[in-house]
Image (tube, helix red, strand yellow):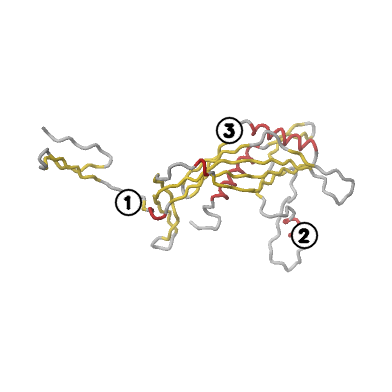
Amino acid sequence: MKTLNTDDIFLRNLSISFLELLNTTMTISMSRNDMKETFSVPFMYNYGIDEGFLKDFYIGLPDNCNIPVAEGTYDMIPRGIITLNSFQVKNSDITNRFIRGQYTETERGTQEENVLTGYSAQLYSLPLAVKFDVKVITGSINQAFKVAESILDLVYSNRVMYFQYKGVRIPAQFHFPEQETIDKKYAFTYSDNNKLNVNIPVDVETYFPSFEQSSKRHSKNVMERILVREFDEEGHLINKVWVDQNTAPVPPEE
């Protein structure tokens, strides 16, 4: 198992769960050859400030360039782009931190292989309020209307997604706005961009599992048995028995 720089990044995993929600639910119907067909609107994360990066980067490359050529359609319409706007800790929702939780870390084994190791530590659940900006680029006013209608199916439904972080299953609840905006600039020149943008702000409620490192312990370090001793009123030992963690103690014989 290889380790990558993209492994176990909390906000990245949250963004992927949001992309999965949008890519599996956002669909529009279009008529082709007198038949209605349903199409999924692809959503991608905004990796840069310029959406035309791929188109600009892969046009006019010299013959001796070692950069591989990207194949496919770069300017897909309609398409959606999500951007992480901000996140903050909701101090008013913080509760008791003295709870022990379990998580995993990747460590080197005896043969220099990667091994998932379980740990337990004091868990501090930090409630987060995360904001995403969603923009759907469409090519016509009818496509923009259909995208807006599809968004209405997400507004008044409970949308909870789960994602993994350090082996912990974390819920994330997405709140869609009750209205969205459609932006378009009308111009009559060939150089202007006449596409329509459907803009949607989305609020997310989730929590970040913060583990206190000073209380870190191996998960396998557990008590297998407990020694139970009973004394009489004068302090003399009357019974001694080892109790397994999965069985109840045996009462003394009368």
Residue linked to disc 2: 59
Q: Looking at the picture, tell me which residue is in the foreground, 11 or 53.
A: 11
How would you rate the neighbour count of disc 2 (Cα within 10 Å): few for under 14, some for 14-19, many for 20 or more? few
Residue 113 against residue 223 in the figure, above or below: below
Cα gap from disc 2 to disc 1, whole angstroms: 58 Å
* Among numbered discs 2 and 3, the one appearing first in the sequence: 2
How would you rate the neighbour count of disc 1 (Cα within 10 Å): few for under 14, some for 14-19, many for 20 or more? few
* Quarter of image, res 137: top right
Residue pictured at 27% horizontal, 46% vertical: 224
Residue 209 against residue 249 in the figure, above or below: below
The tag on residue 158 is 3
Residue linked to disc 1: 221
How would you rate the neighbour count of disc 3 (Cα within 10 Å): few for under 14, some for 14-19, many for 20 or more? few
Front position among marks 2 and 1: 1
Q: Residue furthest right?
A: 188
Q: Amino acid at mark 3?
A: Asn
